[in-house]
Image (cartoon, rainbow, N blue to C red):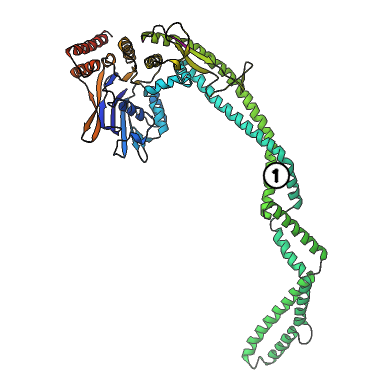
Amino acid sequence: MILGLILHHFAIARKVEVSFNSNLVIITGETGAGKSVIINGISVVCGGDTTTDMIRIGEETATVEASFLISDNEKAKSLLKSFSLYDDEDVLVISRTISKVKGKTIINGHLVSQKQLSQIGKTLVDLHGQHDIQSLLDKSSHLFYLDKFGFSRTSNLKERVINNISRYKELKNYLKELEEMDNKARAETDFINYEIAELEKAKLREGEEEELEEEYKLLTNVKEIIEKISTILQTFTEGDGSLLKQLSFSLNILSQFESFVKEFKEIKGRIESDYVDLKECVRDLENVLSNVRLDPERLSFVEARLDEINRLKLKYKRNVSGLITYLEELKEKVKNFNDLSTKIEETRKKILDLEEQLKKDLIELSKIRREVAKTFKEKVEDELKDLAMESALFKVSLQVVEDPDGIDIEGRKLKLFSDGIDTCEFLISTNPPHDLKPISSIASGGELSRVMLAIKSVIADIDDIPVLAFDEVDAGIGGKTGEKVAEKLFNISKFRQVIVITHLPQIASLPGEHFTVEKIVEGNDTILKMKKLNEYERIDEIARMISGSNITETTIQQAKELLGRWHNENLSN
């Protein structure tokens, strides 16, 4: 249950701080007093959507904080444990800050995500407002209510169906992608194989182009090289005036006089070193010259090879290294093409295997839903009778949809939804002669509210959410019908906490805590006030609700009688 609520700079609430100590909390106030701000605050702290419009004018942030007693809420405790947020305390505190920059949520002192808050909030409070009545008009929500009623029978099977449908659709999409890739591969295979053959035939290798270019330079200059090097060798070795003979002559002279002039010995050593180096140079040049020769055939081959490399580089817009890599990529692509057939067959088998199990589960889930629908119909009709709709007939219409691209079940191609093959729509006839029509055909807001309350009451019997919050569930209702709605809310409060905003004195007089909400104008500022009423203040408030501002002794007595009736009812229970 909710133990307390704090609103700080939220909407028109400067600071509202209230504690709840009852299983039945009643909130009243004039039209437009801001009662829905309280319900909106509960919605926000349980993960509802927020906007910056919720921040009080002139402020940068708004904060909503609520404390919950969760000692008997095993679902909430289990979820908190999974998020590492449970510290063995029976009180859960949630604080949510709405900011114009970036909001935040703290649970038991830990920063949490919006997704985590939303999941936790669903285990704490079930909010019923005007939005829920609108959702009742949307038949896409009807299966949700039916499955919630049949939770004990459908939950595990439905969860498996949802997971398998998701997996089934993933596999079908994956198979489609593989088949598209396979078709594309078949169209590309011939061209790719041609490129592979061309590149393999070229037998490219790293560094070859540089080697060929060096060799080409040599081969195209070989004649000039031979001539020039031969000239150098002649200068070094041929004739009496050659360098080697001149050096040899110089060494002989220095040898004759080195004993006379000591510097000659050192000079002679240096010349001897040059003489040895020059002889080695001559030998190396002769070796090179012996290996360099005119080779037209080799030159022709090198030119052709370079032309081929340049052609491939130009064609594929890659250098030699890139061409070698590209060839490996092409080979890998062909390998993957070949693997596609295997993957396609494996995926088809997975789909068939999953499909067999899925079909069984879909048929079983659909069968259980139809069984649950019969009980749901009977219970809703009973609730409607209690809500002064004695003649109403209610029906749950479950249908399947034919779809040529759907799943084959018992010889029919049926559309596969995310949670099965069933569509669900609630039909109703409020008065004879009975002609069952969609709930959206109901014109009366009061009747819609009662149908919604009937469904909520039926679900409340089996639902384990500890708090139900109703925002003007009595819209369009009055008189005896109001008394019936009050009885229904009172009975629900025996099992869980009920927070109800109401404009009916019949509901406002229910045995529980009674709060009033009002707008107060202070200078140029408007603020929200929320006050818990004592016994005498309750009498005055209910009298106001009966007769407006014209409170008389008669309306005071009527208010006392209403309160006394429920007081006696409470004592008898």
Q: Quadrant of the N terminus?
A: top left
Is 301 drawn above or below residue 566 in the view shown?
below
Q: Residues within 10 Å of mark 1 (few under 14, many from 20)?
A: some
Q: Position of residue 207 (x, y in %)?
A: 69, 58
- Left or right of 408? Residue 555 is left
| Residue 482 within the magenta-colored segment of the rendering | no
- Segment colored magenta: 387-395
Give the residue number, with chain letter if any, for mark 1. 331
Residue that appears at 60% across and 31% down = 173
Q: Quadrant of residue 406?
A: top right
Q: Quadrant of residue 460?
A: top left
- Left or right of 158? Residue 566 is left
Q: Position of residue 513 (x, y in %)?
A: 25, 19
Q: Amino acid at mark 1?
A: Lys
> Could one spot residue 551 in this view of the protein?
yes
Q: Position of residue 502 (x, y in %)?
A: 30, 19
| Residue 390 within the magenta-colored segment of the rendering | yes
